[in-house]
Image (cartoon, rainbow, N blue to C red):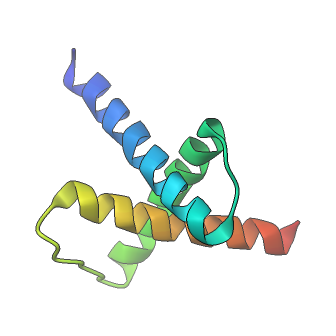
Amino acid sequence: MSDQTKSILIWVLIGLLAGWLASFIVGGGGLIRYVLTGLAGSLVGGFLAQRFGIRLKIGNAFIEQVIIAAVGAIIVVLVARILA
């Protein structure tokens, strides 16, 4: 398996976990929705964390990325609901 394939699979896993976590707070469901919301949340959360210099310092980079993506996913869902 190439490094690029592994990276894509890790992004999808982060998206899935982030979308699933976000669904507990803002509702929603379904595997595809979790992944799409989580991936969008990864972009939004990553941008905001970098922009505002937010560092979680948990000690596990994967868990930090999932948390940042979940927060981003929550923001994405709430903004989408406001605009709908």
Question: Percent position (x, y) of residue 68?
Answer: 38, 67
Q: Residue at x 70, y 56 (%)?
A: 28
Residue 46 or residue 9, whichever sits in front: 9
Q: Place residue 45 in its image quadrant.
A: bottom left
Horizontal side of residue 10 vs 47, given as left or right: left
Picture mark count: 0
Q: Residue furthest front?
A: 24
Q: Residue furthest top?
A: 1
Q: Place residue 11 in its image quadrant.
A: top left
Q: Residue at x 69, y 63 (%)?
A: 27
Q: Residue furthest left?
A: 59
Residue 77 or residue 28, whichever sits in front: 28
Horizontal side of residue 55 vs 84, given as left or right: left
Question: Percent position (x, y) of residue 84?
Answer: 88, 66
Question: Percent position (x, y) of residue 5?
Answer: 30, 23
Q: Residue at x 24, y 79 (%)?
A: 55
Q: Residue at x 26, y 28 (%)?
A: 6
Residue 14 or residue 45, whichever sits in front: 14
